[in-house]
Image (cartoon, helix red, strand yellow):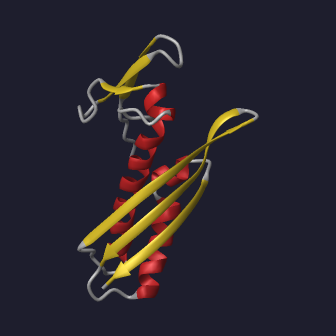
Amino acid sequence: MEITKHASAHWQGGLKDGRGSLSTESGVLSDTAYGFRARFEGQPGTNPEELIGAAHAGCFSMALAMQLGLAGMTAERIDTKAEVTLEQDEGGFTITAVHLSLQAHIPGADRAAFESAVEAAKTGCPVSRLLNAEITLEASLES
């Protein structure tokens, strides 16, 4: 099975004084502003790292729901946060790490099965597989 999704970026101007917009096929992003100031100076707007973090947290959460189902568990709640690290090195800027923080509420969960499902989701989610970065994860289980 192959699924193709479409997104677009438009940019005007130089790196620091320019501005851009992002749009997605679904319309969730529609000419959403992004630029240098939003990326590096904390100004309003989104940036690629924030979007990668959201994509990774969402992908991991869905992968975990699948893995839990395979283990006979269903989560009442899966809350995942992603912290994306962007560092400058001799080759330019690189996303070097993503740290996922998970809080899951799964009534009657088996801890060993939960931990196995978490690891399988971490390594198997398509966004994890895409990134060439260190991916760490801290998981908390409420049963």
Number of numbered markers: 0
Please indicate whether residue 49 sits to the left or right of residue 27 in the image.
right
Front-lying residue, 122 or 11? 11
Please indicate whether residue 27 sits to the left or right of residue 71 in the image.
left
What is the residue that sits farthest to the right in this orientation?
Answer: 90
Q: Is residue 131 above or below residue 21?
A: below
At a point 29% along the width and 80% down the height, the residue shown is 106
Q: Position of residue 69 (x, y in %)?
A: 32, 74
Q: Position of residue 59 (x, y in %)?
A: 39, 54
Q: Is residue 27 above or below residue 100?
A: above
Front-lying residue, 14 or 110? 14
At a point 28% along the width and 32% down the height, the residue shown is 29
Please indicate whether residue 136 sits to the left or right of residue 7 in the image.
right
The image quarter containing residue 50 is top left
The image quarter containing residue 114 is bottom left
Q: Position of residue 92 (x, y in %)?
A: 68, 32
Q: Position of residue 80 (x, y in %)?
A: 37, 62
Quarter occupied by the C terminus? bottom left
Q: Is residue 4 above or below residue 60?
A: above
At a point 35% along the width and 35% down the height, the residue shown is 5
Q: Is residue 40 above or below residue 110?
A: above
What is the residue that sits farthest to the top in this orientation?
Answer: 13
At a point 73% along the width and 33% down the height, the residue shown is 91
